[in-house]
Amino acid sequence: MSIAEQIQSIPTGAWTSDPKHSSVQFSVLHNGLTPFRGGFDAFEATLNDGRLVGIAKVESVTTEDENLTGHLLSPEFFDAERNPELRFESKEIRTEGNRVTIDGDLTLKGVTKPVELRGELAGPISDAYGGTRLGLDLETTVDRTEFGIDWNAPLPSGENLLGNDVKLTAHVQLVQEA
């Protein structure tokens, strides 16, 4: 039986993300052509008795362009000075085999909206270091303008430089606390 087939529900207990084996990213359509991608280097996730909380530090946003990273930190985007964190808090977690659906609230730039994360759950498994791990691979799509992130620039074609839909993804390994 595979690890995915062993899962019946979210395990109880306290779990904390392993930052070396986890990532939080976003992508948004750029120039109407392809996704522009970025992420956050400083984040944490905890799962305590069926309640998932994730926090990313806005100042840790990363892109391939230093100038663009600075623009994302400005009030036109994340407004890092006034809103130093992105936060997700679950309200309900449902599983069906290895599929997981998590309803909760996302707070971005000081605005909180309900979102639904969907993805896969793997584990729990015993790791090579004597611990127990659980994997969550999650995603959702939000309209950035609903969170007050509405900066854009018109293209000569009349379309906007950036799309409104932003795909958020989290690939998280959680380690059970002793």
Image (spheres, grey):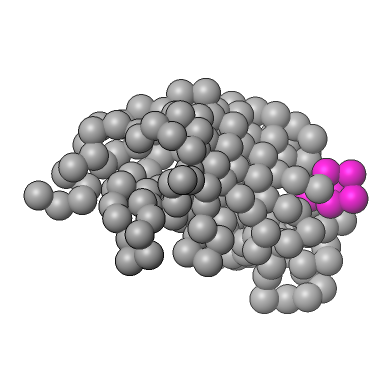
161 over 138 or under it: above or below:
below
Q: In the rendered view, does 167 fall on the left or right side of 145?
A: left
What residue range appears in magenta?
A: 78-83
16 over 147 or under it: above or below:
below
Q: Position of residue 20 (x, y in %)?
A: 53, 66
Using the rendered view, name the quadrant where residue 156 is placed: bottom right
In this view, which residue lies farthest toward the left? 1
In this view, which residue lies farthest toward the top? 91
Q: Position of residue 143 (x, y in %)?
A: 62, 39
Q: Position of residue 160 (x, y in %)?
A: 69, 55
Identity of the residue drawn at 54% across and 42% down: 46
Q: Work out whether residue 82 can be spotted.
A: yes
**Which of the pair 170/153 is nearer the observer?**
170
Q: Work out whether residue 151 can be spotted.
A: no
168 over 103 or under it: above or below:
below
Membership of 18 in magenta stretch? no
43 over 63 or under it: above or below:
above
